[in-house]
Image (cartoon, rainbow, N blue to C red):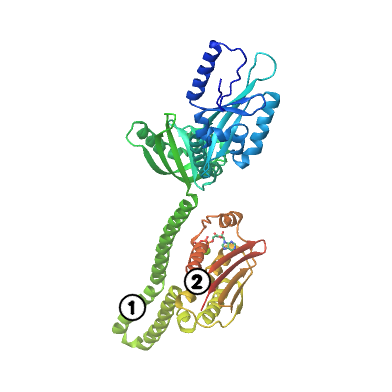
Amino acid sequence: MERSPSDGLHPSPGRGADARDGEDRLRSLCANVPVGLLLADAAGAATLINERFSAIFGAPAAELLGQGWIGRVHPEDREVIDRAWALLVREGRERASELRVVHHGGTAVWCRWHAAPLPSASGPADGFVMLLEDVTASRSQREDLEASEERFRSIFENFPVGIAVATEEGRILRANPTLARMVGYAEDELVGRSFLEITHPDDLRESTRLREECAAGRRTLFNVEKRYLRKDGAAIWVHVTAALQRSSRGALEYVSLIQDIDARKKAEESVRQLSGRLLQLQDEERRRLARSLHETASQTVTLLGLNLQRLAKEPSKQAALLADSSSLIDQLSREIRTVSHLLHPPLLDEVGLAPALRWYADAFAQRSGLAVGLEIDDVGRFGQETETSLFRVVQECLANAHRHSRAKTVGIRLHRTNGKILLTVKDDGAGMPRQVLDRLRAPDASLVGVGLAGMQERIKQLGGRLEIASGGWGTAIRAALPVA
Ligand SMILES: Nc1ncnc2c1ncn2[C@@H]1O[C@H](COP(=O)(O)OP(=O)(O)OP(=O)(O)O)[C@@H](O)[C@H]1O
Ligand SMILES: [Mg+2]
């Protein structure tokens, strides 16, 4: 019988019709199985290769027989497959793995192979069989999926916004590290907890209402600004965007993005407090001026009026009345000047910052009994805003030292270096109370009175910096402003 080179079956002498039948069936099976198939002899040389196998390898069966197929394996996989095949032949152990084959055009095809010994009736294997499947498509799908999962995992892990997945009832299934940091829990401590558990009691009502609207199908998304309760009990403001959507497993789940807006909220709150306090101060100031005008100038004018009436009625007292009126007019003029100087020191516009500060500090020392030391250089003239702001800083610092510090002396230093004007006001008092210092150190520095906050705001608006240092030695306020 003529045997084709791809015939891997080993005829034994004296085979009958049954054996030939079996042989035909096997050949037809090999041709028709929907996988690549290779049969090898007991030495491991390929003796039969089906069409599918040669299609996967991109080469005619004749080139692949013997050890030919191994030569078409991708160079990087060749050594591994060579060794695996040798082991299979030597020890008869079944093996499976993946390999790449290279077509003539250079395209690489990923295949999954599975090889096993062909059992023989007696003793060692009679030959070997290898099944081969092209897995390029499913492998690239798997790689795409892995890459996209990796992308999402990295966003979830590293994004600076809190991300959580929760059940329809709001029970957390997954929370990313940013969210965990925000609320001070470990990620796995959050899992299983309900969002309502970490919601501030004052925001529970609104959060529950939004979830109920989602549950009732009236909305699928909501945005809300609310407070969470951190593990340490502190409240933190967050902005939540939550969407209810169906997961790949068919369950309804919330995906929430949570942004930390605590600093912004606190800044808004302190601006609100500050403007409220400013309005109140403005009212107090007006009342004080009204009272002061009423108690001084308006009394003096009344006396002047009386003098005029008496002049008409008592001509004999003319000289004395005129002298009295003249001194009343002097007094009136002093009183009006005091009030107007308080409102705005006219010296500042006329002679500039350094002389105006010297004048103000002297007057302050006299009135308060505080010793005020001056080291004021003639720094020249600046814009009106700069001069007024620095003047107000000194006014406020002196007032604070007098009201709060129990200091004996205050030093004011003003000088100019490298395009900057530097002003320091330092007292030797008791220093600021602990709670004031704590608030100053807090990142959102919500300030105590209007004084310090106002100073800071003025200097900041002019592009400068205000530093506050305080301790048992006293308090020093230092303003640095850029000047042309
Ligand atoms: N030189 C100082 N020595 C000790 N404590 C000070 C001094 N300056 C300020 N403080 C403390 O800081 C607080 C805040 O000062 P700030 O000037 O902002 O407000 P205030 O003086 O209390 O009120 P106002 O709004 O009228 O200025 C004061 O209440 C005081 O406790
Ligand atoms: Mg003050």
Q: Secondary structure at mark 2?
A: helix
Q: Position of residue 389 (x, y in %)?
A: 49, 72
Residue depicted at 49% across the width and 24% down the height:
31
Q: Nearer the viewer, residue 433 or 108?
A: 108
Q: Position of residue 210 (x, y in %)?
A: 38, 37
The residue labelled by disc 1 is: 306
What distance separates the C-alpha of mark 2 from that of mark 1?
40 Å
Residue depicted at 47% across the width and 39% down the height:
200
Q: Nearer the observer, disc 2 or disc 1?
A: 2
Dot 2 or dot 1, earlier in sequence: 1
The residue labelled by disc 2 is: 392
Q: Nearer the viewer, residue 111 or 362?
A: 111
Residue 243 left/right relative to 379: left
Image quarter hosting the N terminus: top right
Query: Where, by quadrant of the figure, is residue 220 drawn?
Result: top left
Q: Position of residue 435 (x, y in %)?
A: 58, 54
Q: Nearer the viewer, residue 149 or 4?
A: 4
Mark 2 packing: few (<14 Cα in 10 Å), some, or many (20+)? some
